[in-house]
Amino acid sequence: MKKVMLVFGTRPEAIKMCPLVKELKSRQNVQTLVCVTGQHREMLRQVLEAFSVKPDRNLDIMRQGQTLFDVTERVMEGVKKVLAEERPDVMLVHGDTTTTFAAALAAYYMNVPIGHVEAGLRTYDIRAPYPEEFNRQAVGILADYNFAPTPTARDNLIREGKRPQTVFVTGNTAIDALGTTVRSDFSHPELEWAKGYRLVILTAHRRENWGEPLRHIFRGIRRVVEELPDVKVLYPIHLNPLVRQAAEETLRGCDRIRLVEPIEVVTFHNFLARSYMILTDSGGIQEEAPSLGKPVLVLRDVTERPEGVAAGTLKVIGTREEDVYREFRTLMTDEAAYDAMSRAENPYGDGLASRRIADILIYGKAKV
Ligand code: UD1
Ligand code: UDP
């Protein structure tokens, strides 16, 4: 029987790995182990509870205001010990966080084969997003199985010299998760607050946006909200103190902008589904929005998700106040521009990515 160990530690990794945990646990011929690094604490717990996944190991590494060094060192040390005790046949990591990179490096040092879920996303700018572009490229060098969500991601890997027989197009497990969370009969007090208004969801947390870019973003958004009386913005703020400080300073005092704690994932997906549009620098939300038909203005200079841009749902607008103001205002006032972006097209898979990944690990190829 094959022993598969999944390692993840932040909110987005958990959202996209939980469907795979469930799929692997449903298979007879696999022993599945879940090791969380705890790079996130509360935000990770929210997801594990929502998907009823109980980790076998928790390295519990999070510290307030942790640095990249803290996370890298603590994940490597912790994963090394777990790998020495468990000796899995394959270790799966997801995407591009420092948990992903450090766990993969530990597995490589321990000669444990690595499977990379959500492989092949690229901007080819090592500083954007920072340090995620480095993390995913580095894991790309180490991985024995590359589960690419889209043909574009596969092509990136092949162009970089990965052996074709190690690269599989599976779809993104984000779509598997979304299929289990969005409901037609959903209600919530925040939705009552937004009743009669156009609800805009905002999230922003990226490292390269810390400091001035975040303040620019928030000022541009606030100006539009103050000019358009039928708009309300809901912003669940990431728990990072630097992000919270910038948000509090720039957005407080505007009664149509509501700052709230991170929202549990089922609720959050239902908010997205009922929103008018989305402003975000998040990676995962760029994958979810196209299948919900919600326009997204991407608060970054580049994206590794060109499929959503090609589908017409995403527009990359950068972080300068004037650009954010202009693009946000246009989308809220120009109906034709809005309609052109609000088509529901989903380039990220059919919700069966986890099944394919499990098949490939067990049988060597996907059966769906
Ligand atoms: C991390 C990932 C990023 C991913 C993001 C998703 C790295 C380098 N960054 O960034 O790729 O997009 O997660 O959200 O891997 N905190 C809490 N409780 C929590 C979570 C965070 O208090 O549950 C606070 C802590 O003070 C922590 C800080 O946020 O030190 C930063 O967390 P960290 O994981 O280092 O960076 P993120 O910005 O969350
Ligand atoms: N999300 C959530 N609650 C929130 C904000 C985001 O559940 O309050 C979900 C969102 O739907 C997506 C994921 O978290 O699936 C994105 O995580 P984040 O933006 O932290 O990280 P990124 O995707 O940028 O790495």
Image (cartoon, grey):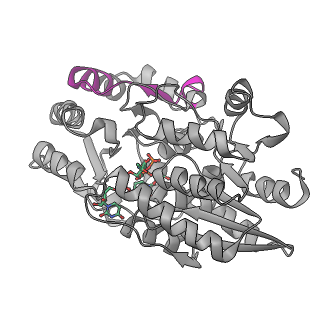
> What residue is at 57 percent from the left and 76 percent from the top?
55
| Between 232 and 102, the one nearer to me in the picture | 102
Indicate whether 165 appears above or below 323.
below
Indicate whether 154 appears above or below 39.
above
- Asked whether residue 115 is drawn in magenta, I would say no
Range of the magenta residues? 308-328
Residue 127 horizontal/vertical position (percent): 40, 30
Res. 182 visible in picture = no
| Between 246 and 364, the one nearer to me in the picture | 364
> What residue is at 37 percent from the left and 69 percent from the top?
42
Q: Quadrant of residue 262?
A: bottom left
> What residue is at 55 percent from the left and 66 percent from the top?
79
Res. 169 visible in picture = yes
- Asked whether residue 313 is drawn in magenta, I would say yes
Q: Quadrant of the N terminus?
A: bottom right
In the image, taking residue 249 as reference, residue 313 lies left or right, namely: right
Indicate whether 204 appears above or below 153.
below
Indicate whether 134 appears above or below 176.
above
In the image, taking residue 158 as reference, residue 269 lies left or right, namely: left
Residue 139 horizontal/vertical position (percent): 60, 44
